[in-house]
């Protein structure tokens, strides 16, 4: 089944809002195994809307519209679809009653243009709007199913979950499910990952392998279709095993999660506590850890030792070390990690010291970062990084590397 | 000039991300007075992309593409545009050098597929990518201008601001300019602001008044069109003055800046230093301050006192205060702000203590936050907030309120 989504509304073309409805609908359709081939945004203009409808009718089996069902002159989705299909609009009595009583209840006279919200395409399946006035509707003509839905997300989302998903499911052949597994990678770039898995990616059919890069991480979504979830998982497992065999050292987690969530959950699981001494990351690492609900059970606190005075006075780093090796050094990273661990009384102490940029520091280049991982009962580990990118990229990456290395180190405890 | 925007990427059709690039570009084009008539999203598929390109060429004067400029097999925007135009792709040497040195710097071998990122349409205007590897490009053929831009917002936005806007401006008839002034508001919501300015917003024509809400702030963009920048500013000034007369207390800055930039710049201007004691914001406040280049001149450091032990041991808050009033209290906020100021030796000390959620703390409700502002020579100020929203919204807002109150307090110094 080939689907496309058409969002109607000039405010989208003016950039006043983003088309999050298309994202929402696409996720839902993907879960049903329905392929979406196009998103279109068109304004509140009859000719252009009619053009877009005709094009969609010619190329798609399922066309989902959002927006343009309201009471104003600019709202013309059903009128234009009706014109394309050469069908009438009729009043849906349940919708009309609801609209009328909404106004009656508030002691306001209903404006005439509100009546048009109760109109639906003749012989359509009507979807009640439990959070607004305009009902949704669906009708099939000449092999294409047209689904017209409201624009406001607060009305759209419940209508889709409650009425539209069951309707669409009834259109599908009953025989297959789609099931995904997501692998999350850190420390390897998208192109390098693709290179290592190139033959798998080129040969893919079932499951499909979709790489996606964002915020210094890469994820791979493996999606299989089969008669049942168990059979889909059986198709995914060997592909996942081969991927892990080749690049498993970069896998930090699975499913819809994040590096900081995985990190905090591991700390909770192992019942260990952590504290951080941050120089160049300036609080980002602590902020990432504390963004996870429940982190207070494992995160005691941290010191943002942005200046050398604070490194000396609060973390007792010796002035001579700062003089000879500098704050951006392996020895400073070691000292900071060990000190914060002792001062805060935690199992693990993490330090991050480096040059975030844009200017070099202590004669050292932008991107040079040292991460110290002090763990009770183990020798302190210090890792050196040479990160590329702008200040915020270096800061973000350094904080993630710190959690990644700490995760690896915790395996040895 | 009729424009349309085409976003290329299967991840958009799978609903993995929303097409925020189209929103951003549409705002920018609106500011230039260029009308956008369609947004399209198409997947990483040669036939469908070629179809969309051909359709756009037939109906639009300006076609802007985002995405599909990367190194993988799925990236095919320039190849497909080149095929449509029957032109070649050539290596842009500046881009190739940058890509090669990126890998050399990190001591990693560049994978072959990265070379294609340096290819551009022959005879195109090349837009450097200051935040990534793939350059943008623009070329005009047969009355249609094709602009190809990267997908990641962190690369797209600066490229558009720095290079694409001037390029597009050069395409426009020179007879009128568009000039904008942006007012930045904090501490008032979008609908409340709109209500206070309703008559101005309804009556707007030249300048236009466009409100944008994001990340707990509201901005108003006043855009005037006139024969010259001076005449446009003359149209804007009275409207700006009326707005400031009504809601000036919520204006924290102007233009393309942020609360943390304004804050750090004020500290630099007044030559004062700051330190932070953060409980519920967990490092976010320090991270915001240190995200500003040059902040090391004014930010000494901070203590993320996430646990009561750290509040006691590092910030010397008395156990009895924590027992009787609790960590989430006016007295704790005062103590934390004053102590961190003394310990770090700064002019200003800021504290944030509260309940970020999702669970209540010390029997106090989610969203209750106290902010302490200690300034040398002034009595310590403590503000109480009742914030709504989820954990990350409360944390983000609390950090911004802390800077906003500190900014206000610094005026009294």
Image (spheres, coloured by chain):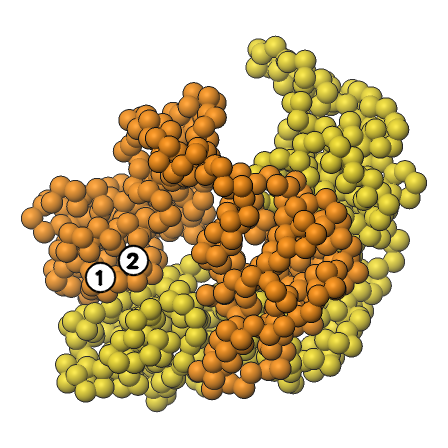
Chain colours: A yellow, B orange
**Disc 1 secondary structure class:** strand
Q: Give the residue drawn at x 23%, y 74%.
A: A343
In the displayed structure, would residue B391 be above or below residue B2?
Answer: below
Do marks 2 and 1 share a chain? yes
Q: Which residue is mark 1?
A: B299
Number of marks present in the image shown: 2
Marking on residue B289: 2
Residue B227 in percent (x, y) is at: 43, 34
Look at the image and tell me whether residue A29 can be seen. Answer: no
Q: Residue at x 44, y 60 (%)?
A: A292
Where is residue B9 shown, x and y percent of the image? 67, 59
Q: Position of residue A268 (x, y in %)?
A: 45, 69
Does A372 appear above or below A139? below
* Label 2: element kind: helix
Residue at the extreme right: A142
Q: In the figure, is residue B152 to the left or right of B230?
A: right
Displayed quadrant of residue A83 = top right
- The chain containing the residue under callout 2 comes to B
Q: Are marks 2 and 1 in contact (CB under 8 Å)?
A: yes
The structure residue drawn at horizontal position 24% and vertical position 44%, both measured from the top left corner, is B405
Q: In the picture provided, is B65 more to the left or to the right than B85?
A: left
Give the percent coordinates (x, y) of residue B330: 21, 45
In this view, the residue farthest toward the left is B377
């Amino acid at each position: 089944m080939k689907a496309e989504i058409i969002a109607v509304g000039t405010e989208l073309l003016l950039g006043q809002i983003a088309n999050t409805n298309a994202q929402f609908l696409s996720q839902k359709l993907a879960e049903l195994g329905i392929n979406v081939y196009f998103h279109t945004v068109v304004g509140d203009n009859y000719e252009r809307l009619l053009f877009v409808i005709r094009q969609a009718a010619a190329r798609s089996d399922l066309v989902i519209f959002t927006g343009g069902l309201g009471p104003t002159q600019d709202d013309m989705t059903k009128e234009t679809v009706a014109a394309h299909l050469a069908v009438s609009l009729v009043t849906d009595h349940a919708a009309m009653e609801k609209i009328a009583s909404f106004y009656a209840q508030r002691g306001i006279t209903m404006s005439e243009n509100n009546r048009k919200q109760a109109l639906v395409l003749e012989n359509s399946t009507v979807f009640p709007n439990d959070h607004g006035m305009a009902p949704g509707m669906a009708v099939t003509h000449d092999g294409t199913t047209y689904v017209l839905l409201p624009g406001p997300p607060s009305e759209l989302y419940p209508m889709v979950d409650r009425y539209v998903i069951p309707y669409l499911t009834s259109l599908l052949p009953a025989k297959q499910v789609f099931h995904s597994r997501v692998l999350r990678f850190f420390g390897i770039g998208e192109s390098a990952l693709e290179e290592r898995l190139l033959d798998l990616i080129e040969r893919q059919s079932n499951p499909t392998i979709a790489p996606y890069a964002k915020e210094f991480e890469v994820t791979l979504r493996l999606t299989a279709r089969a008669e049942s979830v168990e059979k889909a998982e059986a198709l995914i497992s060997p592909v996942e095993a081969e991927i892990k065999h080749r690049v498993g050292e970069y896998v930090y987690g699975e499913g819809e999660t994040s590096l900081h969530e995985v990190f905090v959950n591991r700390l909770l699981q192992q019942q260990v506590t952590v504290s951080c001494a941050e120089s160049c990351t300036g609080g980002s690492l602590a902020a990432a850890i504390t963004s996870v609900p429940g982190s207070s059970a494992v995160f005691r606190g941290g010191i943002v030792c942005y200046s050398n005075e604070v490194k000396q006075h609060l973390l007792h780093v010796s002035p001579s070390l700062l003089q000879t090796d500098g704050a951006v050094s392996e020895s400073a990273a070691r000292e900071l990690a060990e000190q914060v661990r002792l001062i805060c009384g935690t199992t693990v102490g993490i330090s991050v010291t480096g040059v975030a940029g844009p200017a070099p520091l202590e004669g050292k280049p932008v991107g040079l970062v040292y991460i110290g991982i002090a763990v009770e009962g183990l020798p302190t580990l210090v890792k050196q990084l040479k990160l590329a990118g702008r200040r915020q990229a270096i800061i973000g990456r350094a904080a993630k590397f710190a959690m990644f290395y700490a995760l690896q180190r915790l395996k040895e405890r």
